Image (cartoon, rainbow, N blue to C red):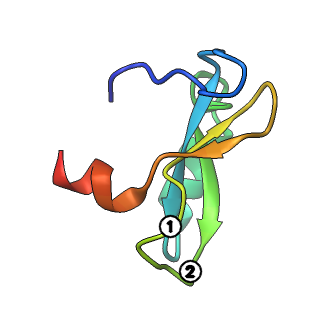
Amino acid sequence: MTEKTCPNCNGTNVAEIMYGYPSSQFLDEMKKDENKGKFQLGGCCISNDDPAFSCNDCGNLFGHREEEEDG
């Protein structure tokens, strides 16, 4: 993933929002220090309007999953 910039505060401390039911292996990976702040769980109810990213600095949710999946 290329570095994302928050459109609200221009911060680069941005987490990718992961949707669906996470595996225990993924949850263990999220707990590692090198992965803290890189991912946020978005839940298992998924729509095309869900945000793709969350700013860890200001809390802004932005982008759309649909756009990110298409490239």
Q: Is residue 10 left or right of residue 67?
A: right
Q: Nearer the viewer, residue 1 or 22?
A: 1
Q: Quadrant of the N terminus?
A: top left
| Residue 14 position in % (x across, y down) | 60, 28
Q: Quadrant of residue 70?
A: bottom left
Local packing at callout 2 (Cα closer than 10 Å; few below 14, some 14-19, many 20+) is few
The structure residue drawn at horizontal position 43% and vertical position 55%, both measured from the top left corner, is 64
| Residue 38 position in % (x across, y down) | 57, 33
Q: Which residue is mark 2?
A: 44
Q: Are marks 1 and 2 in contact (CB under 8 Å)?
A: yes
Q: Nearer the viewer, residue 18 or 54?
A: 54
As helix, strand or loop, the secondary structure at mark 1 comes to: strand
**Marker count (numbered):** 2
Which amino acid, by three-letter code, is at mark 2? Cys
- Which disc, if any, is residue 19? 1
Q: Is residue 62 left or right of residue 57?
A: left
The structure residue drawn at horizontal position 41% and vertical position 73%, both measured from the top left corner, is 48
Local packing at callout 1 (Cα closer than 10 Å; few below 14, some 14-19, many 20+) is some
